[in-house]
Every structure is written in structure tokens, then in C-alpha cells.
Amino acid sequence: MLKFKTILADPLVLVIILATLLRIALPLSALAVTGQSSVFSTADTPSYLLPAQFLLKHGSFSAGMSPEIVRTPGYPVFLMAGIVFNQPTAIPLILQITLSCLTVYLVYLITLKIFLSRPAALAASLLYAGEPQSVLYSAKLMTETLFAFLLAGLLYLLILYLTRPRLRFLLAAAATGTALAYVRPIGYYLPFLIALFIGINSHIRHRFWSVFFPPLLLFLLLSYGLLLPWQVRNSRQAGYSGFSAIADCNLYFHTMPAIMAHQPGREYTEIKAQMKVQSYEDFCRAQSELPGDSQGAALRQMKRQALFAISRDIPFFTWLHVKGMLRTLIGPGATEFIKLFNLKKYLPGKMDDQLGMLAPLSRIIYVLVKNPVFTALAVFLDLVLALYLFLSIYPSIKRKIHAQGPVLLLLTVTLYFIILSGGFVGQSRLRHPIMPIICIFAGYGLHLFWTQKNWYETPAAI
């Protein structure tokens, strides 16, 4: 009993217990209100469940007659445990709650490693424990929670390598980074960026190329050596040489109509209605009776059409991309909270929500006034986000943070995800992977703000 009380006296244990309770309470509340397990799914969930089911039943990764080349196998494999035990919702949610709580612990470890301050590390873990998006997406059958856990694990391994260069840390990071890309293809270019960063950081520290280059080369070979088989599979089965077709689909089905709608007299909805194939699901149905390699040929043609449309209005495309980055960074994410409780009557119309990137300010104000519940929740979530963002930059405002290797690594990775998450598809959900990083800096900022003292702690020498 005494040992149990000692464990409970540890603030970190209390933070993790709080994180667990929040992540259990939200789905249980949603289930009590709606009585439907379907609220834990989104429009994208079937595109992960179907390949998992086909993989179990037929041994092939597909969602029908054609091989699946948009979704990568990471998250569908994760969902297979639930399918095997006939609990396709409950088991993945339990696993996601566990991973989300482990991410809280990783946030603590990373903060402690960088700033050498347990109060700052506890503050960072507490902030992540109650961070709205992190709580929400642990209750959604989506890639976010698994992806955030793997990214936090990758960053921790890289920081270990930067502080104490050992090949085992770098090889473990390569394996984790590969898993990251298989869960969401946005992680595909991250190993190259990491190798470039470590190389530049090592060069600045006047380390010899013969010392740091061979491990980095091994890191790249292992990372892309594990990713290459999937590209070979896509090429052989579908005639598509890329790792995933998600970026091409986003260009054709979303960005191209948005660019074309910028022309005088054109409307986004009108352009979408005139498209014979309006979504990837339509594309799959159209291709299901054709030879496998026709997918690749069709996707290449779609990509050429999208790039041609973009080339005709590059300034607007640039503006759209920057606006999408801002939407990713500061979007409130109220829609998914409301959907979780099946209160769709409080949501703006689907087109109003989708056209937030294109609509004039007057239209946006009209929609917000017409939907007061949505607006109130969005304002609340944005105020919480503003607090997190303020705390994350507070150390810089007070000049209490050094441009050391781990800090620059976190900033580089944050910038990577913000830039790649821009464009017409930019949304608050895409901010989820960098919330652990924001909480790391915010935790240190909260510690500084609370103590109001000079920086008496020395960060790890890098």
C-alpha cells in the first residue's frame, strides 16, 4: 500500500492518469449521448478498414478489384487486431488511448532531455494530456494518434542521437521513420530532411565528414530501403511508381477545381459537378473493371491536368497554399467535436465548410452568425490554441532559449509538416502531428511564466 501511495505521489503518474481519464471519458460520453459506435468513424475510416479486411480475407491490399495505392498499409494493419477479434471499433480505440498516453510520456522525456527541467517537462506533459485535438483523435478511427506517437518516438530517438551519437539510436530512428511513412505518406520525405539536418548540424560543430557521413548514409539506406518495396509493389500491380497517390488525388480532386474557380464566372461547386470523376472513390469504381496498370496511367493523366491548371495561375496557387498552411496552424477543429456527438444540425452546410478557403469574408461571417453553437465552440478551441501558441513562443520572447541542435530539429520538423499540409486541403486535423512539439515548447514557456525567474538552468550542450 505504501508503494502504491508513493507511485501516486509522482506528479508524472498523476498527469498520465489525467490523460487516460480524459481519453476514456470523451468516447464514453459520445456513446452515452448518441448510442452509436459509428460516431467514432469519419468519412475516411472505410478507406482504411476495407484494405484491412481484404488483407485478412484475401491476402491482398486492396479495396475491391483494384490494388489500393492511395492508402498505405500502416494504419490498416493497426486496425486488423480489431477485425480479428470482431471488435473493429473498441480494440483500436483502446490501443489509441494507450498510444496517446504514451505520447504524453514521450513529451515529458523530450522536454526533460532538451531543457533539463522536470517542472518544464511536467508542464509540457500536462498540456499535452489536456490538448483538445489529442484527446479528440484518440476517439476517432483515423491515423492521427498512431502517427503522433511514432513521430514523438522518432524525435526522442533523434534527440538521443544528437546528444550522444550512437548508431543504435539512428538505426532505431530509421525504423520508426519508416513506420511513420507507412502510416501516413506525408512522412516519406522526412528521413532525407533529417539526414540533411544532422549533416549540417554536425558540420557546424566541426565534426569530420568521415565520422558523421557513414552513419547518415546507413540511416538513409535503411529508411528508403524499407520504403522501396512498397513502390515496387505499386509499380507492378498498378503501374504507379510513387509511394502513394494521395498527393496526386488531392491535386486533381481538390486543388485543380479551386484553381479553376478563380477564373471569372466559374464556381467551385459547378466545376466539381461537371467532373466525371469527383472523388477517389469514383475513380476506383471506374477503374475496377480495367487492367491493374490502368490506375497508374489514369493517375499520371490526372496529375498532368492538375499541374497544367496550376501552371496557369501560380500566384493564386501560392496564395491558396499559404492560406491552407494558416488554416492548418490556427484552425479550431470544432467540426469533428460536434460530429463525435452526432450534433450535425449545429454544423454549417458541407459546402460552406469546404469553401472556407474560397468564400469571401462576408459569406464566412454570415455562416458563423447563422451557426452560433459551432461558432462558440470554434472560438473556445481557438482561444485554447492561442494560449498554447503563446506559451510556445514565450521562451523566445524572453530570450530564454538557445538555438541548439534538438531545438532546431523540432522547429525544422514543425515547419516541414506545416508547409506540406498547406493548400486547399489544409485543415486543423493536419496540425495534430506537431501538437506534441508545440506542447514541448509551451511547457517550457509555462514553466518560465510561472517562475518569472532568470534562466538558471543550462540546456543540454549540443
Image (spheres, rainbow, N blue to C red):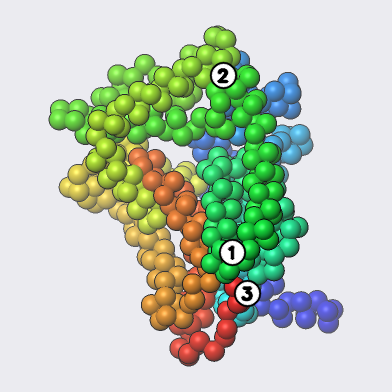
Whether residue 316 is visible to the viewer of this picture, yes or no, is yes
Query: What amino acid type is highlighted by mark number 2?
Result: Gly
Q: Quadrant of residue 82?
A: top right
Q: What residue does disc 1 label?
A: 202
Residue 104 % position (x, y): 62, 64
The residue under the point 32% across, 49% down is 322
Secondary structure of residue under mark 1: helix
Q: How far apart are marks 1 and 3 (CA)?
A: 23 Å
Q: How far apart are marks 1 and 2 (CA)?
A: 40 Å
Q: Pick the residue in front: 75 or 72.
A: 72
Name above or below for residue 177 compared with residue 163: above
Residue 239 is marked as 2
Of the numbered discs 2 and 3, the one sitting upstream in the chain is 3
Residue 352 % position (x, y): 29, 39
Left or right, 314 with respect to 61, comes to: left
Q: How far apart are marks 2 and 3 (CA)?
A: 47 Å
